[in-house]
Every structure is written in structure tokens, then in C-alpha cells.
Image (spheres, grey):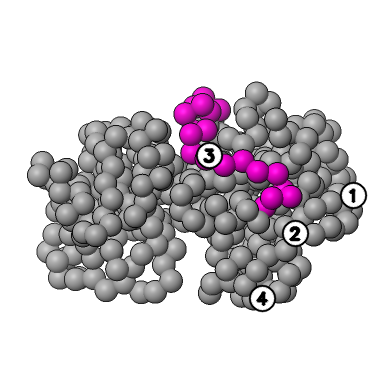
């Protein structure tokens, strides 16, 4: 089968023929992949920016951690009803061997391996995963929408971390998939006003508006403060959620918060940020980090996606077969597209 792999710890990815996975072992299932999203993490791994050195021991490794598929074959110990189910997969696989796992404290597992990072992933026709990582997806849900579940759980967790309350005014910095999903869940939480700002980001901001969020701004050629000025006349924001990964905007993001406001950092930052802590202290502001969502969030997010499939589908701006995965990576890196999905041939229409 064709698989998109990381072969060596250096820039680049390779599409080539690999053997299909072996029959699933105890607790595992073999998934026939239907749709896989290209994520910012995949772009970082392809470009080989810092932070992924631990992948080296898994190479060559098939990438792809945001996906949906059907259970083709179930290993020993997996319930019989698993066969044929459509699922999406939590990519974080527990080791079941570290002190935390033995103590039942799975959230603190120190031996996690990410599907599509530390073990083979879903830019391929088939992938082996533990059944315990599978989350059921309604059969009527479009596979490409189900493949958005993983990034959308990250968005869900960012909004939970922010503690958005009905009536809040929310600024989202970064109009990519994560910023878009944060806007959607901020709406669910009852935010009264949601402003999304980008930087030289006309295409993705257009997608934000198509999703139903008219309040967008572009900070290209001006400061963030200037870009959002049309909305700060009425007062500063209750919540600012940063999903751009740009450390230099963190001080400005803080200055756009009202007293006792909450800044949530969802972006991955390649360098430290410098902030005025005295201003933070005197204004009782809070900075909170957010990352992977808890297991319980997954069925909730699947439910939201299945009920809002047509609207959420607007986040997907390109669909390509695996044979054109290279092109998909170029599109995703160019910032013109929002989510780029790789579809396996059987489900491509
Ligand atoms: Zn991802
Ligand atoms: Zn563990």
C-alpha cells in the first residue's frame, strides 16, 4: 500500500509502497482508513523543525494522526461488534507499562506513543491501533468531517480551559483550523461576540466568515491592537485565545484583556515570550495553557460534528488522494487552505 512516511531525522517526507500491516494482535484493530487530515504538526515534522527528535527511533514511520475509517479486522480480546464499525481514533496510545499506567493514572503515562508520530499512522490505506483508542462515529457522518474530530477536541479543550461564560466577548488569534474550531465552541459556550484575527490571512479569514463569524480582522501592516480596534471601543475582551504560535503577540494579547480576563495559549511556540508581569498582577489577569483533551471530550465532539456536519465541512477546503499527498502538504503549508484532507480511493467521489 502507498504510505506517506518520515524516513530520516531531516527535512522531507516520502510517499512509497510499504507492506500492509500484519493481522492485529491482542487488543488491536486493523482500520481501513477513509479520510486523514493534514495537521500543522505534520507540516512541522515534514519541515523537521525542533521538537520532534523523539520520533527518530520510530523511523521509518507513516504519518497521519487525524483520521476516520472502518474496522476491518479485530484482534483477540476485542468485542465482536467492533468489526465493521466506523471510528475515529485518539492518537495518543498508552504504554500500559510505566508507573503511572500501573497505578491507573493514565493521564500521566510517560510512555505514550502518538499514532502517526511515534508509531505508524493513517496516511495509508490501513493502520493498526488499539481498540481502546477508537471512538465510534455515526455511519451517516461524512468520513472527512469525522477526521476533524482530533483537532476539534483540541479546540473544545481550549474553550473549556478558558471557562467562557454566556455573554463573554472573545478574541481568537489565529484563523487556522484550531482558531476556527475555537470560534465554533466559543459560540456553543454562549459567547456574545467572537472576533477572529489573522496576519496576512485573507483566505482563512474568508473561511471563518463562511463558518458564520462575520467579525474578522487582518493585522498585516498594523498592530494586533489596531486590527481589533473596531471591537475594543465597547471594552476589552473577557477572553483571548491564542492559536497562532507567535510569541511576540503574547504581550499585546494580554493588553487586550479586561481586568480579571483570561488569556489561553493554544499555539505551539518555538521561542519564549516576554511579558509585563506587573501589569498582569495589578489587573488580576490569568494566563492558561491548553493541550490534549481528556478522553471524555471525544464522544461530545463527535456528537457536535455529526449534528453540524454541513457547517463544519466548510473548514475543509481541499480533498486529495494519497497519490497527491505532496501537493496536499504544499497547500496546507501555504496558508491559503484551511483543512486539507487526504481521501483513500475507495471513498473518494
Ligand atoms: Zn493534529
Ligand atoms: Zn504508561
| Magenta-drawn segment | 306-325
User: Disc 2 and disc 4: Cα gap in Å?
Assistant: 16 Å
Answer with mark 2 or mark 4, whichever residue precedes in sequence: 4
Q: Secondary structure at mark 3?
A: strand
Answer with mark 3 or mark 1, whichever residue precedes in sequence: 1
Q: Which residue is mark 4?
A: 9
Q: Residue at x 36, y 44 (%)?
A: 205
* Mark 4 surroundings: few (<14), some (14-19) or many (≥20) residues within 10 A: some
Query: Does the CB distance between marks 2 and 4 fall below 8 Å?
Result: no
Answer with mark 2 or mark 1, whichever residue precedes in sequence: 2
Q: Quadrant of residue 42?
A: bottom right
User: Disc 3 and disc 2: Cα gap in Å?
Assistant: 23 Å
Q: Which mark is residue 23?
A: 1
Say left or right for 303 vs 320.
Answer: left
Q: Which residue is mark 2?
A: 15
User: Disc 2 and disc 1: Cα gap in Å?
Assistant: 23 Å
Q: Residue at x 33, y 52 (%)?
A: 198
Q: Which mark is residue 95?
A: none
Q: Quadrant of residue 348?
A: top right
Q: Which residue is mark 3?
A: 316
Q: Secondary structure at mark 1?
A: loop
User: Closer to the camera: disc 4 or disc 1?
Assistant: 4
Answer with mark 4 or mark 1, whichever residue precedes in sequence: 4
Q: Residue 106, position in %: x, y?
A: 60, 56
Say left or right for 87 vs 161.
Answer: right
Q: Residue at x 18, y 56 (%)?
A: 225
Beta carbon at label 4 within 8 Å of ligand 1: no
Give 259 or 209, whichever is nearer the viewer.
209
User: Closer to the camera: disc 2 or disc 1?
Assistant: 2
Amino acid at each position: 500500500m502507498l504510505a506517506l512516511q518520515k524516513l530520516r531525522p531531516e527535512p522531507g517526507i516520502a510517499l512509497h509502497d510499504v507492506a500492509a500491516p500484519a493481522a492485529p494482535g491482542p487488543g488491536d484493530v486493523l482500520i481501513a482508513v477513509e479520510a486523514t487530515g493534514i495537521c500543522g504538526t505534520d507540516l512541522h515534522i515534514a519541515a523537521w523543525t525542533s521538537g520532534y527528535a523523539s520520533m527518530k527511533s520510530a523511523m521509518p514511520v507513516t504519518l497521519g494522526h487525524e483520521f476516520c475509517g472502518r474496522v476491518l479486522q479485530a484482534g483477540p480480546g476485542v468485542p465482536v461488534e467492533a468489526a465493521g464499525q466506523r471510528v475515529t481514533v485518539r492518537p495518543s496510545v498508552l504504554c500500559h507499562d510505566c508507573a503511572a499506567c500501573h497505578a491507573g493514572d493514565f493521564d500521566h503515562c510517560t510512555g505514550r506513543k502518538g499514532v502517526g508520530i511515534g508509531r505508524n499512522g493513517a496516511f495509508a490505506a490501513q493502520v493498526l491501533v488499539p481498540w481502546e483508542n477508537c471512538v465510534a462515529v455515526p455511519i451517516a457522518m461524512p468520513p472527512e468531517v469525522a477526521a476533524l474530530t482530533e483537532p476539534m477536541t483540541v479546540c473544545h479543550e481550549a474553550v473549556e480551559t478558558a471557562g467562557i461564560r454566556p455573554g463573554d466577548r472573545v478574541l481568537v488569534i489565529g484563523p487556522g483550523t484550531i482558531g476556527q474550531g475555537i470560534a465554533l465552541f466559543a459560540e456553543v459556550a454562549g459567547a456574545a461576540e467572537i472576533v477572529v484575527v489573522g496576519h496576512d490571512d485573507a483566505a482563512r479569514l474568508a473561511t471563518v466568515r463562511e463558518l458564520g463569524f462575520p467579525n474578522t480582522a487582518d493585522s498585516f501592516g498594523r498592530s494586533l491592537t489596531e486590527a481589533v480596534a473596531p471591537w475594543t471601543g465597547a471594552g476589552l475582551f473577557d477572553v483571548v485565545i491564542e492559536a497562532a504560535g507567535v510569541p511576540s503577540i503574547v504581550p499585546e494579547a494580554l493588553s487586550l484583556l479586561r481586568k480579571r480576563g483570561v488569556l489561553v495559549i493554544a499555539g505551539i511556540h518555538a521561542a519564549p515570550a516576554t511579558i509585563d508581569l506587573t501589569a498582569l498582577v495589578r489587573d488580576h489577569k490569568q494566563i492558561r495553557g491548553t493541550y490534549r483533551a481528556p478522553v471524555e471530550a471525544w464522544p461530545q465532539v463527535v456528537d457536535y460534528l455529526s449534528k453540524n456536519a454541513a457547517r463544519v465541512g466548510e473548514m475543509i477546503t481541499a480533498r486529495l488522494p494519497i497519490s497527491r499527498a505532496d501537493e496536499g502538504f504544499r497547500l496546507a503549508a501555504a496558508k491559503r487552505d484551511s483543512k486539507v484532507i487526504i481521501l483513500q480511493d475507495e471513498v473518494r467521489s
